[in-house]
Amino acid sequence: MQSQLQIPIDKKIKAVYLFVVLHALQMGVGVVGLPRVVYEEAKQDSWVSVLIAGIALHIVIACIVFILNSYKNTDIHGILAQIFGQKISKVLSMVFIFYFYLMFISILLNYIEFVQVFIFPKLSTGFIASLLIFLVIYAVYGGVRAAVGSSIVFFFTTIWMVLLLIEPIFLMRAEYFLPVLDNSPQDIFSGALKTSYSILGFELIWVLYPFIQDKKNVAKYSHFAMLFTIILVMYVTVVAIGYFSPKHLEMKVWPLFTMFKIITLPIFERFDVISVALWLMVVIPNLILLGWMISYSCKRVTGLKQKHCLHVFMLIALIVATFVDKREYVNILTDYVGQAGIFFGLTLPFLLLPFAIYKRVKGNKS
Amino acid sequence: MKYHLLVICILLVMLVGCAEENIIEDLGIVTVYGFDKDEDTGHLLATTVLYQFDPDITNASQIINSEGDTLQGVKRNANKESGHKITNGQLRVILFGPSLSKEDGFIEHLDTLGRDAKLSDIVYIAVSDQPSDQVLASTNYEEAPNIGAYLHQLIETAVRNEEITSSTYHEYLRDYFQVGRDPVLPLLSVDSEKVTIKNIAALQDDKVVGDFTIEEGFYIRLMVDQFDSGLIELKLPIEPFEDHLEEYAEIEDPHIYAVIDKINSNTDITMESKNPPSFEVKIDIDGRVIELSRQLNLDDPETLDVLETQVTKQMEKELEEVINKAQEMNADVFGFGVKYNNNTRGEDLTKEQWREMFTDIEVETTIKINIERHGTVQ
């Protein structure tokens, strides 16, 4: 495996797209249920948990960008290869790919569940999964630029949905936020950990880095992306706490969709149904970016053709999705991915940091 | 290869149309459910009011009585009596008769509203003082297509005119779960074949424990919400005004009636002490005089001052009466308990604890009224 990648200029992207791409991958199925998940831990101080998670996120992304800048034109697999040697690094890379693959499957299954609960209860999981997977394969064929391009299109077609929460905002009550900071720091901290599933996805930068044309801007735009994600997550959490009373919020599996339930427009009596359908446009970029990342990483590590990797992964995903369709399993899988994310997303950068510092120091001496 | 994929994608997208079809002529669309309890069998007695969109029938509304134990079960049983597929998606009002609302409670019948994504969150919950089948059988429902649509209009108009507090499923349920605040619901009643909002029912959880008149409801709304354009009629004693009257006719009434509308209010409740719980309520009201039963020259600042003082006095008195009445019922519809809970750190209030404390709380009210205008008459 070559460690320094030479990406042709026609495959490179501008750093400014990182803003949309990283944000698009972070936003997805997690934020729909996030208010409840955090609330179960940190109660009315959930917004503090999200704030802490946001600060942690910025530190992590700064760390990742520092490591990537130290190793110049390479991605996570190249870095692992330089640190641990070819053999061990391959195993580590495989684990990394498997983690992204689990994330892919959990997003797929979670979205399918939305559709089944809100719109078509009788539509089989396998059928919806095959629809989505075909779309993903089609987009990934287009390469990295198609994957990035599609997320930009879908970002602009869905971002207006933040305005939909205006109606719930009018029904918010200040009393649900009081008393402020009444929960123990442990509760607030575990709330921050629970936020992780909703803000995972920034790991994409590990793989996308060599494709970026103007590397000096990477830090700036990736921080912007994190800031934007945290602002949105905070917004949803705060509105949900104010809109539901305490026990009420803990009952709602997907508080965000429940908040859409009170919106009626003259042409759409029940906007929540439309919003679930629209959520496809939030989820599809997730799947496409992850699909590209998995298949590309597979090619890097095993040397197989990217297309073949993609086909195998998507076929297995389809089979898994067809058989794992109970809410219980989906929950377990989502929990595991969230926990794995704490290691792969938030801890791994700090483990690699000493090597990067060592490399910089050595580089300066010679 | 790419072309083939595109064809497959288009095909798959088109196939979604085959998922589940609902033809509107074949549907019986429920607008209101009324629930009572059968005293003999213990089952739920339901009255289902349906819409039908069949161009051939003239009377598009239907009422079906059925039995069951759950809302969905009742729906299934109602389906046995109708050639249409009964769907809940357009449900607007759920009405509970006294057998449920006064004795057994009805919270278990609301579960499916939250669970079934087909049901909306803006369904109004209401209670009635007669069995709900009688209420729904009333024949005068103005120009509305059926009784369900009428009830929805009736409640929504009252909510929009700020006569009652909104009581949608979401709002009822969040008050139900909130410790230290009890919900209120509109109490419907049939009067000569027409349904009216008679009173405002105060609940302990899901049981009606008493009711307030619409006029008393004004003060409840004043405490829990903000008015943008409310209206209140006040009966004031005549004595303080005697020097200011400018009569053009002899009226033999020891009172003066004043109507204030376009009321804009702001309420601030603060907890004064914890043991015994005492609260201070400060209310600022802006409004205009729209009707007076006796002539007063309100351009004279002195007269206006007297009017404002008397209105304040009267309102404070009535507000205290409403609070006392709520304490007698032991239903904290104002949310004092929430204030108490928010001001005590590190301990969690339970509903039972607050029920014991609420009857003994002390409330001091200060109302500040500001009459901005008084119409086209001096």
Image (cartoon, coloured by chain):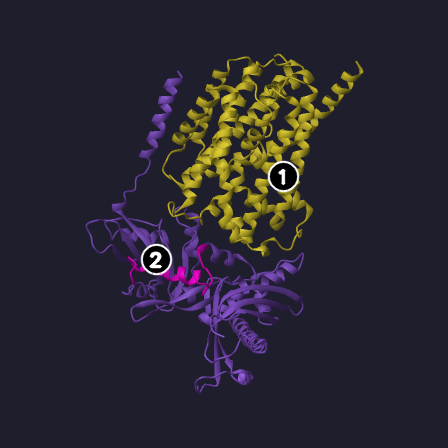
The quadrant where residue A203 appears: top right
Q: Is residue A45 above or below residue B18?
A: below
The quadrant in which the N terminus of chain A is found is top right
Q: Residue at x 56, y 59 (%)?
A: B179
- Res. A90 visible in picture: yes
Whether B157 is among the magenta residues is yes
Q: Quadrant of the C terminus of chain A?
A: top right
**Residue kind at label 2, given as amino acid type:** Tyr
Q: Circle 1 sits in a helix, a strand or a loop, which is it?
A: helix
Tell me the amino acid under the disc marked 1.
Leu
Nearest the eye: A56 or B297: B297
Residue wearing tag 2: B33
Q: Label 2 marks which chain's residue?
A: B
Q: Give the residue drawn at x 63%, y 68%.
A: B279
Colour for chain A in the figure: yellow
Q: Judge by depth and name the residue closer to the eye, A257 or A312.
A: A257
| A285 to B128, vertically: above or below | above
The colour applied to the residues of chain B in this rendering is: purple
Which region shows up in magenta? B142-169
Q: Tell me the residue that label 1 is attached to.
A: A193
**Where is residue A59 shown, x and y percent of the image?**
68, 33
Q: Nearer the viewer, residue A194 or B153?
A: B153
Is B15 contained in the magenta span? no
Where in the figure is residue A329, as x and y percent of width and height? 49, 36
